[in-house]
Image (cartoon, grey):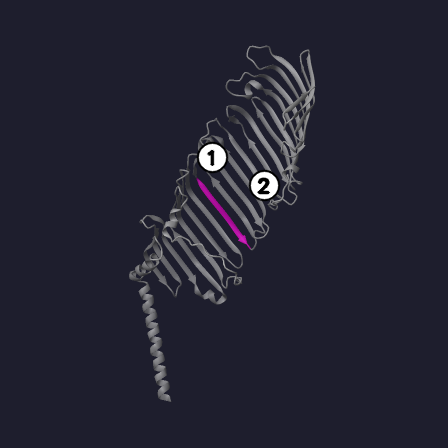
Amino acid sequence: MKKRLKQLFISTGILIGILVFLSLGAIFYLKTNHALRLIQGKVNDLIPGAILCERHRFSLLKGEFELTRVSLRDPSGDSLAGLDRLFIDLSWTTLLKGDLTVATLILEGPWADVKIDKKGKINLMRAFPPSEAKEEGPEVGKSGGIPINIVLKSMKLMRGSIRYEVVADDLKAVVQDIELTANGNLLKRYGSLNLMIGDGRLDSPKIRTELDGFRLEATLNEDRVDPVVLQVSTPSTELTLSGNIGDIFDSPLPDLDLNIALSLPEVRKALFLEPTLTGRVSTRITIQGTPDNPRVTFNSAYGGGMLSGQQVDRIGIDCLLKDRFLAINSLQADMASGRFNLNGEVDLKDAFVNGFLDPQRDLESISYRFFVKQKGIRLEKLISGNNPLGGVIDSDLSLNGKGISPQTLSANITMELSAKDFTAVPDTPQIDFHLKTSASLKKGVATVERLEAEAGDITIQTEGNLDLSSKKVKAM
């Protein structure tokens, strides 16, 4: 009996020794270049393209894995994407607590060259087998969630770059100096992200611009993203977005502040616009509340310059959207040709009874009121180029109505206009005249309820209607 136990212990020891020896041998072999080439060969036999790696290093005990100079190539051998170095450090001890912890994840010099041909095919897909449509079968059961938590302690992406080209649109874009840091915990719904781009270019027949800087910072804590910071800088635009978003997974509640500064000469240059544009525009937008019924403020100011040949001293806009009610508090413009002012309101409550995102909407229920006042409008400066008009115009206009389609909307309009030293033909006498009118539009019929015009000793009074569907005119 003792002899048999002794033989059993000896056999078990030898077996364990062989297993340890084979394991160590396998680990040692996997570290060799021969094993790397063998694994690459097996993987590349499964895809049309090829994945190449110059060198690798790993330690199972430490949980460290490193790949150097990795590249993805298409069947013709052209490089599509790659990176200089990939390093992963896993913490095995946290598996006992149900956590797969990535202590360190480093990507150095990742790059991709994305090209979409005239047929809409992406070059990266040439390296992989074509996807096959799978038949949908009956659901066997629903997953109870992931059995293990994933924790990312530190991720760093350094010196990244992407080239993007759409052949059909003759569009090319490049972003370089991409830097990214991140960490997170999946089950605790926590994560932070910091993304920076140092340089970029966009070139197409419609737009040509450069990216001077880009920064995105966001932190997720349970169901709240706070803070959210976005900064974008180009020769024509400075954009800054800051704030937070609550209840991000169920019913997002943004509280955001957006500031935009535009250089109009640079905008003109980037968009290949012909009209002369000078000066700067500053805009601030705030957004609060649910997307289906937000509170939005919009304030914009133009400090003065040339707009399409017009000398403009300033333009200002102040609007508020609250509870589906848009208030245009002020839209003012001071120009060489005169002063313009508009204010009004648009009631959207009946049109979007259940909010802006609800598919049920009735645009014909939109109601509105506008008041427009023009002071000292100099007609000779209103239109650039060959302009036969002359004189100074003052006017007041009010409009209120409901609906947007000419066949169904109902609206009322009143206008009073005064002209001094008016002329429409060169070398003709100048005249002064005064005009008053009130009109309405209902069910496709425009009715001039009153029209009074005075010019010197001449007075004209008339009324009438126009049926927009039949185009019949009746005047008195």
Name which residue lies at 54% across and 48% down.
Answer: 227
Up-down: is 149 above or below 124?
Answer: below
x, y percent for residue 368: 66, 34
Disc 2 target residue: 286
Real-space CA distance between mark 1 and mark 2, rounded to the nearest whole angstrom: 22 Å
Residue sitting farthest toward the bottom:
1
* Secondary structure under the numbered disc 2 in the rendered image: strand
Depth check, front residue: 404 or 452: 404
User: Which secondary structure dominates the residues rendered in magenta?
Assistant: strand
Disc 1 target residue: 236
Depth check, front residue: 335 or 39: 39
x, y percent for residue 362: 64, 40
Residue span colored magenta: 212-221
- Residue 288 occupies quadrant: top right
Callout 2, which amino acid? Answer: Thr
Name which residue lies at 61% across and 30% down.
Answer: 331
- Residue 323 occupies quadrant: top right
Quarter of the figure with the N terminus:
bottom left
Residue 299 badge: none
Up-down: is 211 above or below 126?
Answer: above
Name which residue lies at 29% across and 61% down.
Answer: 34
Name which residue lies at 36% across and 61% down.
Answer: 58
